Amino acid sequence: MGRQIQVYMTDYAAGKFLAKQEDLQFEKDTPGYKAQEADIFNIYEQVKYQEIIGFGGAFTQASAVNLFGMGREKQQEIMRAYFDPKEGIGYSFCRATINSCDFSTESYAYDETPDDFDLKDFTIEHDRKDVIPMIREARRWNPELKIFSSPWSPPRWMKTNGRMDKGRFLKKECRQVWADYFVRYLEEYEKEGIPVWGVTIQNEPNAEMGWESCFYNDQEERDFLENYLKPAFDRAGRKEKILFWDHNKERAVDRTLEIVSSEKARAAADGIALHWYVGDHFGALDAIHQLMPGKYMIGTEACVGTEKKENYAAGEKYAHDIIGDLNHWANGWADWNMILNKDGGPDHWMEEQVRFRERYEREKPALEALTPDEQEFLMPCLETGIWVGEAPVVVKTETELEYKSTYYYMGHFSKFIRPGAVRIGSSIYTKDLEACVFLNPDGQKAAVVLNQSGCEKNLVLRCQKEIAGTVMPAHSIATFLFK
């Protein structure tokens, strides 16, 4: 008897969702010219790459509000589904927001007092209502859960436009107090019994958006990192990781070149955070790895909307990006909102657009009658429509949940590739199949294979001169586990 291979599959056509399949069994690979050569998926356990931190989603206020709007039984179902490694999908690495984001019920900061450079009025009381209880509940299911946190905007009094939304910049005279603000956030969360693994400097610093946002060019982010944020951490004895960029991959190498151009900034940065919104650009991760080997590369945000699509399509998109990132040195991958309602909220930016559209259609104001902000940030929704977000878990009613394909496809990674796993070498015979393989801390190997094609594909796993044949149905994903 050869080694056994456990198989878990998601195949919407067959009604399978992270479903345990019949075990496969390795057999001896035939030597010489009679050997199996076609359909091979090779696994090279002798070749090792990066270590994995984990997988997860974001503790947005929207997620917390939706969670606590359900009854206790449904709350427990959601927490179990996300954080229990046996009965759920074992989330281990999740994001939180510093101040509000678009998926908050309102725009808020922890210190709203103008010119409070000593941060005397700093308080995380707003988070104690919903976000902190959700994180605590998640940590009850997984005490080893790691949290990293990202700001969408400094408080309005630190911004050049006097508001948290609609872009613009951090005031130069507020760079020090903003760095100190990070430290206070970490200290206050620690007092709540929530250690934070690390922070990103700014969510999407290359964009000025209608919701909370703040622009940093390459030099500004490098200067803030090396002259303000890292020194503030050092003075306070903080050891949390600092990741830069936290934006799309297409310009990630440019930002990395700026960071590594300074020895001080290179030493201050623990890694880079990446989003997926403008294409694969997996080669950028290879370039970043060459520029700063040994630093973290983490996918920190991805999401889809409620636009009409095949039931497996969003899951496939997630899996494609996760496999691509992991095979190009990423150490982890985090989704965006964990829970949204059927209307894609709460999302105060979406609500602002709805109000604007209703007023515009009612009053038909001339373009010049609109404020510059309305012209720049709100007018586009009249042409493109209002984007509505979708989460892996959707609250349909007070008692009914819907699990989207993204939940199951995420689970093929988060449930089986555990923190501390190391990527090992592999090769596969066709571009129609995408795959990655990891060696878990307990010695078990986890191989994830995605078939996005409309045809079933033969697959022959080959490892340690043993082989096992199977078939990947059209539009399916499978995780194979074996020692």
Image (tube, rainbow, N blue to C red):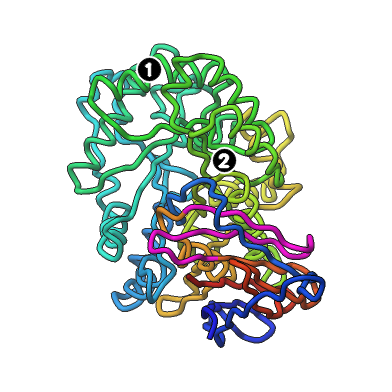
Describe residue 446's horizontal placement relative to residue 12 as left or right.
left
Indicate whether 64 appears above or below 299: below
How far is disc 2 from disc 1 in space, using C-alphas?
A: 22 Å
- Disc 1 marks a residue whose amino acid type is Tyr
Q: Residues within 10 Å of mark 1 (few under 14, many from 20)?
A: some
- Disc 2 marks a residue whose amino acid type is Leu
Please provide the residue range marked out in magenta. Answer: 422-446
Residue 423 is a magenta residue: yes
- The circle drawn on residue 228 is 1
| Along the viewing direction, whichever of 390 and 52 lies nearer the viewer | 52
Indicate whether 102 appears above or below 427: above
Indicate whether 286 appears above or below 92: above
Name the outermost residue toward the front. Answer: 32
Q: Position of residue 455 (x, y in %)?
A: 81, 76
| Along the viewing direction, whichever of 128 and 261 lies nearer the viewer | 261
Q: Residues within 10 Å of mark 2 (few under 14, many from 20)?
A: many
Q: How many marks?
A: 2
Q: Position of residue 90 (x, y in %)?
A: 40, 65
Q: Residue 167 sits in which quadrant?
A: top right
SS of the residue under disc 2: strand
